[in-house]
């Protein structure tokens, strides 16, 4: 799980691993802002401050790897 990520020049592959039913509204909104729509859906984002802040809000719902 992603915890305490820091901004860098890396590209991150972000995959949603849990559903949003029962999650708080701000967490649902954060996943949508990241571009995630369903369990198993992945997006690639740069590890800038905004993205890292979003990921630190929903670490239990996503899996983060460094994109190749």
Image: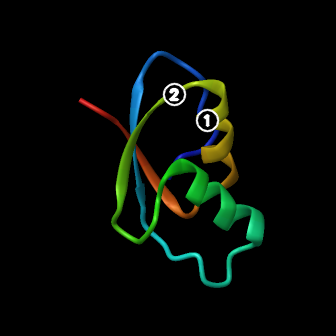
Which residue appears at 65% of the width and 67% of the height? 28
Q: Is residue 62 visible?
A: yes
Question: Furthest-top residue in view?
Answer: 9
User: Tags 2 and 1 in contact by the CB under 8 Å rule?
Assistant: yes
As rendered, which of 61 and 41 lies closer to the eye? 41
Badge number at residue 47: 2
Q: Is residue 59 visible?
A: no
Residue 32 sits above or below residue 21 on the image:
above
Residue 25 sits above or below residue 53 on the image:
below
Q: Looking at the picture, how far across and down is residue 25, in whole percent?
A: 75, 70
Category of crowding for the residue at label 2, using alpha-carbon neighbours closer than 10 angstroms: few (below 14), some (14–19), many (at least 20): many
For label 1, the SS is helix
Which residue appears at 68% of the width and 38% of the height? 53
As rendered, which of 34 and 17 lies closer to the eye? 34
Q: Looking at the picture, how far across and down is residue 10, in whole percent?
A: 42, 22
Badge number at residue 52: 1
Badge number at residue 18: none
Quarter of the image that includes the C terminus = top left
Taking 67 as reference, is 15 left or right? right
Q: Looking at the picture, how far across and down is residue 1, in whole percent?
A: 50, 53
Counting residues from the start of the chain, the first of labels 2 and 1 encountered is 2
């Amino acid at each position: 799980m992603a915890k305490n990520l820091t901004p860098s020049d890396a590209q991150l592959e972000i995959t949603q691993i849990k559903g949003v039913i029962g999650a708080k509204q701000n967490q649902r909104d954060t996943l949508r802002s990241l571009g995630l729509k369903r369990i198993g859906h992945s997006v690639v984002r740069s590890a800038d401050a905004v993205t890292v802040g979003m990921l630190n809000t929903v670490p239990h719902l996503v899996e983060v790897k460094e994109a190749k």
